[in-house]
Amino acid sequence: MQNAKQGDTVLIDYSVRKADGTVVGHTEETGPQEIKIGDGAIFPQVEEKLVDMKVGDKESVTIDCENAFGARREEMVIDIPRDNLPADAEPQPGMTLQAQQQDGSAVTLYVVAVSEQSVKADGNHPLAGEDISFDVTLREIKHAA
Protein backbone atom coordinates (compact mmCIF):
# COMPACT_ATOMS: atom_id res chain seq x y z
CA MET A 1 0.00 0.00 0.00
CA GLN A 2 1.42 3.37 -1.03
CA ASN A 3 1.71 6.48 1.11
CA ALA A 4 0.18 9.84 0.26
CA LYS A 5 2.58 12.42 -1.12
CA GLN A 6 2.65 16.04 -2.27
CA GLY A 7 0.41 16.52 -5.31
CA ASP A 8 -1.85 13.54 -4.53
CA THR A 9 -5.59 14.07 -4.24
CA VAL A 10 -6.90 12.48 -1.07
CA LEU A 11 -10.26 11.82 0.51
CA ILE A 12 -10.29 12.57 4.24
CA ASP A 13 -12.65 12.51 7.18
CA TYR A 14 -11.90 14.95 9.96
CA SER A 15 -13.17 16.57 13.09
CA VAL A 16 -12.00 19.93 14.43
CA ARG A 17 -11.99 20.63 18.16
CA LYS A 18 -11.26 23.65 20.31
CA ALA A 19 -8.83 23.23 23.21
CA ASP A 20 -11.76 22.54 25.58
CA GLY A 21 -12.81 19.57 23.41
CA THR A 22 -15.81 21.25 21.78
CA VAL A 23 -16.24 19.95 18.22
CA VAL A 24 -16.55 22.91 15.83
CA GLY A 25 -16.42 21.11 12.49
CA HIS A 26 -16.53 17.60 11.08
CA THR A 27 -17.31 15.57 8.00
CA GLU A 28 -19.87 13.27 9.64
CA GLU A 29 -22.81 14.87 7.85
CA THR A 30 -21.17 16.03 4.63
CA GLY A 31 -19.04 12.97 4.00
CA PRO A 32 -15.31 12.79 3.28
CA GLN A 33 -13.67 15.85 1.75
CA GLU A 34 -11.40 15.74 -1.26
CA ILE A 35 -8.25 17.84 -1.21
CA LYS A 36 -5.06 17.99 -3.21
CA ILE A 37 -2.02 17.91 -0.94
CA GLY A 38 -0.05 21.10 -1.51
CA ASP A 39 -2.91 23.23 -2.89
CA GLY A 40 -3.39 25.06 0.41
CA ALA A 41 -7.07 24.15 0.72
CA ILE A 42 -6.49 23.10 4.34
CA PHE A 43 -4.03 24.22 7.01
CA PRO A 44 -0.40 23.44 6.08
CA GLN A 45 0.07 21.53 9.34
CA VAL A 46 -2.72 19.13 8.30
CA GLU A 47 -1.24 18.74 4.82
CA GLU A 48 2.13 17.88 6.42
CA LYS A 49 0.44 15.13 8.45
CA LEU A 50 -1.23 13.72 5.34
CA VAL A 51 2.12 13.20 3.62
CA ASP A 52 3.24 9.60 4.20
CA MET A 53 -0.14 8.49 5.58
CA LYS A 54 -1.69 5.31 4.20
CA VAL A 55 -5.39 4.62 3.60
CA GLY A 56 -7.00 3.98 7.00
CA ASP A 57 -4.33 5.88 8.96
CA LYS A 58 -5.51 8.34 11.61
CA GLU A 59 -3.51 11.33 12.79
CA SER A 60 -4.06 14.32 15.06
CA VAL A 61 -2.50 17.75 14.80
CA THR A 62 -2.91 20.80 17.03
CA ILE A 63 -2.62 24.25 15.48
CA ASP A 64 -2.00 27.23 17.75
CA CYS A 65 -4.27 30.23 17.34
CA GLU A 66 -1.61 32.33 15.60
CA ASN A 67 -1.36 29.75 12.81
CA ALA A 68 -5.09 28.98 12.75
CA PHE A 69 -7.43 31.99 12.72
CA GLY A 70 -5.14 34.47 14.48
CA ALA A 71 -5.28 36.16 17.84
CA ARG A 72 -8.52 37.74 18.96
CA ARG A 73 -8.42 41.51 18.41
CA GLU A 74 -10.80 43.59 20.52
CA GLU A 75 -10.58 46.50 18.06
CA MET A 76 -12.50 44.23 15.65
CA VAL A 77 -15.59 44.46 17.91
CA ILE A 78 -17.56 47.52 16.87
CA ASP A 79 -20.85 49.26 17.59
CA ILE A 80 -22.83 50.06 14.46
CA PRO A 81 -25.54 52.72 14.80
CA ARG A 82 -28.92 51.33 13.71
CA ASP A 83 -29.18 54.32 11.32
CA ASN A 84 -26.27 52.82 9.34
CA LEU A 85 -28.20 49.61 8.67
CA PRO A 86 -30.91 49.16 6.02
CA ALA A 87 -34.32 50.21 7.36
CA ASP A 88 -35.72 46.71 6.93
CA ALA A 89 -32.79 45.02 8.71
CA GLU A 90 -33.73 42.95 11.74
CA PRO A 91 -30.35 41.92 13.17
CA GLN A 92 -30.24 39.18 15.80
CA PRO A 93 -27.31 37.80 17.80
CA GLY A 94 -25.61 35.06 15.79
CA MET A 95 -26.42 36.58 12.40
CA THR A 96 -23.72 37.67 10.01
CA LEU A 97 -23.43 40.99 8.25
CA GLN A 98 -21.24 41.85 5.28
CA ALA A 99 -19.38 45.15 5.41
CA GLN A 100 -16.83 46.90 3.28
CA GLN A 101 -13.53 47.91 4.83
CA GLN A 102 -11.75 51.18 4.02
CA ASP A 103 -9.50 49.37 1.53
CA GLY A 104 -12.59 48.08 -0.32
CA SER A 105 -12.29 44.47 0.81
CA ALA A 106 -15.28 42.67 2.30
CA VAL A 107 -15.42 41.55 5.90
CA THR A 108 -17.91 39.31 7.67
CA LEU A 109 -19.20 40.65 10.96
CA TYR A 110 -20.90 38.46 13.56
CA VAL A 111 -23.73 40.13 15.46
CA VAL A 112 -23.14 39.65 19.19
CA ALA A 113 -25.67 42.08 20.71
CA VAL A 114 -28.56 44.27 19.57
CA SER A 115 -30.05 47.36 21.20
CA GLU A 116 -32.52 49.99 19.99
CA GLN A 117 -29.67 52.36 19.12
CA SER A 118 -26.93 50.06 17.86
CA VAL A 119 -25.73 46.62 16.89
CA LYS A 120 -22.53 45.23 18.39
CA ALA A 121 -20.67 43.22 15.75
CA ASP A 122 -17.45 41.23 15.88
CA GLY A 123 -15.13 41.13 12.87
CA ASN A 124 -12.97 38.39 14.38
CA HIS A 125 -13.34 34.88 13.01
CA PRO A 126 -15.41 32.86 15.52
CA LEU A 127 -12.32 30.73 16.26
CA ALA A 128 -9.88 33.67 16.60
CA GLY A 129 -7.78 33.25 19.71
CA GLU A 130 -8.46 29.49 19.83
CA ASP A 131 -5.99 26.67 19.41
CA ILE A 132 -7.64 23.97 17.31
CA SER A 133 -7.03 20.27 16.83
CA PHE A 134 -7.73 18.20 13.73
CA ASP A 135 -8.33 14.46 13.92
CA VAL A 136 -7.85 13.23 10.34
CA THR A 137 -8.53 9.81 8.79
CA LEU A 138 -7.23 9.12 5.29
CA ARG A 139 -9.94 7.34 3.26
CA GLU A 140 -8.56 7.25 -0.28
CA ILE A 141 -5.51 8.31 -2.29
CA LYS A 142 -5.59 9.30 -5.96
CA HIS A 143 -1.91 9.43 -6.80
CA ALA A 144 -0.59 12.27 -8.94
CA ALA A 145 0.73 11.27 -12.33
Image (cartoon, helix red, strand yellow):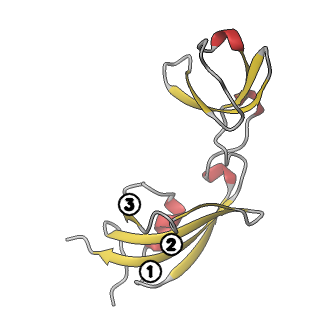
Could you classify mark 2 by the number of other residues whose Cα lies within 10 Å: few (under 14), some (14-19), or many (20 or more)?
Answer: some
* Quarter in which the N terminus is drawn: bottom left
| Separation (CA) of disc 3 from disc 1 | 14 Å
Contact between marks 3 and 1 (CB within 8 A): the answer is: no
* Residue 31, quarter of the rendered image: bottom left
Q: Which residue type does callout 3 highlight?
A: Gly
**Figure check: 78 above or below 49:** above
Q: Residue at x 51, y 26 (%)?
A: 106
Contact between marks 1 and 2 (CB within 8 A): the answer is: yes
Q: Residue at x 27, y 74 (%)?
A: 143
Q: Secondary structure at mark 2?
A: helix
Expressed as whole percent of the image width and height from the top left, the position of residue 100 reads 53, 20
Q: Give the mark, 3 or 1, whose residue is nearer the N terminus.
A: 3
Per the image, the residue denoted by label 3 is 38
Expressed as whole percent of the image width and height from the top left, the position of residue 47 reads 46, 65
Expressed as whole percent of the image width and height from the top left, the position of residue 140 reads 36, 77
Contact between marks 2 and 3 (CB within 8 A): the answer is: no
Determine which of the numbered discs, if any, sits on residue 49 in the image: 2
Expressed as whole percent of the image width and height from the top left, the position of residue 8 reads 31, 69
Could you classify mark 1 by the number of other residues whose Cα lies within 10 Å: few (under 14), some (14-19), or many (20 or more)?
Answer: some
Q: Residue furthest bottom?
A: 1
* Residue 50, quarter of the rendered image: bottom left
**Figure check: 32 above or below 64:** below
Per the image, the residue denoted by label 1 is 53
| Separation (CA) of disc 2 from disc 3 | 12 Å
